Image (cartoon, rainbow, N blue to C red):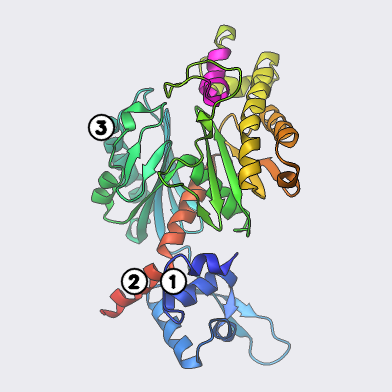
Amino acid sequence: MDYAILVNMLDTNPASPGHVLAVLRAEGPLTRQELQERVGVSRVTMVERLDALRRTDLVRQAGHRESSGGRRAELLAVNDTGRTALVADIGQSHATLAVVDLRGTVFARQDLRLSTRHSPDETLPRLVGEARSLLSDSGRAESLCAVGLSVPGQIDHETGVTTAPPTMREWGSVRLRDPFADAFGVPVLLENDANALALADYYAMGRPEATVVGVKVGTGIGAGVVIAGRPHRGETGSAGEIGHMRIEGSDRRCSCGRRGCVAAEASGQALVRSLRTSGARSVEDVVRWVSDGRREAVEAVSAAGRLVGTVLATVVTIVNPRYVRLGGAVGVLPPFVEALRATVEANAHASALRKLDIAASQLGDRGAFVGLSGLVADEMLSPATVDALCRRRQGL
């Protein structure tokens, strides 16, 4: 993990408790002596910083360093299991809630079916109520430190207001943070669902010093880009909207109102429409048919992979990522992955392909939880947040 990614997120005293924890998080477990040498402070200062971190329950013992002689030194690590996050992935027809720790361990989860045209007024009170019950039943309510939410579409991260995706038109101009902040009294973090997927794979790969692109193909199509450990959202939050890039030769009207978008031809919603005469009624039907080897479904999904691969080749050429990870119910299907990979390799610039690794995400339906728990961890364990917590604990 790149230590600079953690420390440079926020301006902080290089000898503060938050700075010490960032070093430990990036390079631990470490002995006190090793940590002191890496931070570059005196023994007395290090003892003071560790005392502050222990008082806030942010450091734990992690065994001992093996020694060829003499007393074995105690190893220290970040305590990322003592705090709890409540996370929710909200989609067009479903929502999934989970209680996790900052390592991403899931203690409780609940999958909810939502009505096809669900509205915020209908859905948010239900989600808050279900989340409250799930948290209570998990036995971890006392350690709740934050809520993380992922949704399709764009988010104004300053105000917490959403821009509705074409598939969820009722969700425009919604102050998504407010109901959860009022109910739980903790910070509420928001993220686009494709960014959450990209972050999840970035975290699962051990936070490589590399650019990661995550492409989610489910009901709709979206992408997220992680650069230097942080999601790249663009100036207006619309970075990654590859589902609404136009493809040559298509005049089909998209749910966004334009014509020729790749989502109109290759999304899960488009696949259901194209296979309706064969009896498909849902994305789940398409997935099942591909698993069963039904020819028309395999061919349709392969064609979708080629279309998404065509626009992704442009993204790969411009962004030059090291990893592309595919998620969503359609995005992980083998015919889709194979067709997309072949199309990108045939169309992207040769230099952008040199180190490129394209694969389906291995996280399955845990992707949103991993991404959101990591997002919460980066915020709640950031140097500035930790320093503020230590000051409050000391009554300063």
Looking at the rendered structure, the kind of residue marked 2 is Leu
Quadrant hosting residue 36:
bottom right
Quadrant hosting residue 71:
bottom right
Image spot of residue 161 (x, y percent): 31, 42
Which sits earlier in the primary sequence, circle 1 or circle 3?
Answer: 1
Q: How many angstroms separate mark 1 from mark 3 (CA)?
A: 38 Å
Q: For the residue labelled by badge 2, is the local secondary structure a helix, a strand or a loop?
A: helix
Which sits earlier in the primary sequence, circle 3 or circle 2?
Answer: 3
Quickly name the residue at label 1: 58
Mark linked to residue 389: 2
Q: How many angstroms separate mark 2 from mark 1 (CA)?
A: 10 Å
Is the C-beta separation of discs 2 and 1 under 8 Å? yes
Mark 1 against mark 3, which lies toward the viewer? 3
Bounds of the magenta segment: 260-274
Q: Residue at x 55, y 51 (%)?
A: 226
Image spot of residue 358 (x, y percent): 69, 42
Quadrant hosting residue 65:
bottom right
Image spot of residue 130 (x, y percent): 33, 40
Looking at the rendered structure, the kind of residue marked 3 is Asp
Q: How many angstroms separate mark 3 from mark 2 (CA)?
A: 35 Å
Q: Give whichever of 350, 173 is nearer the camera.
A: 350
Q: Residue at x 46, y 60 (%)?
A: 378
Quickly name the residue at label 3: 121
With respect to residue 294, does 36 lie above or below? Answer: below
Q: For the residue labelled by badge 3, is the local secondary structure a helix, a strand or a loop?
A: helix
Mark 2 against mark 1, which lies toward the viewer? 2
Determine the main secondary structure of the stretch shown in magenta.
helix
Q: Quadrant of the N terminus?
A: bottom right
Magenta span contains residue 307: no
Q: For the residue labelled by badge 1, is the local secondary structure a helix, a strand or a loop?
A: loop
| Residue 196 seen | yes
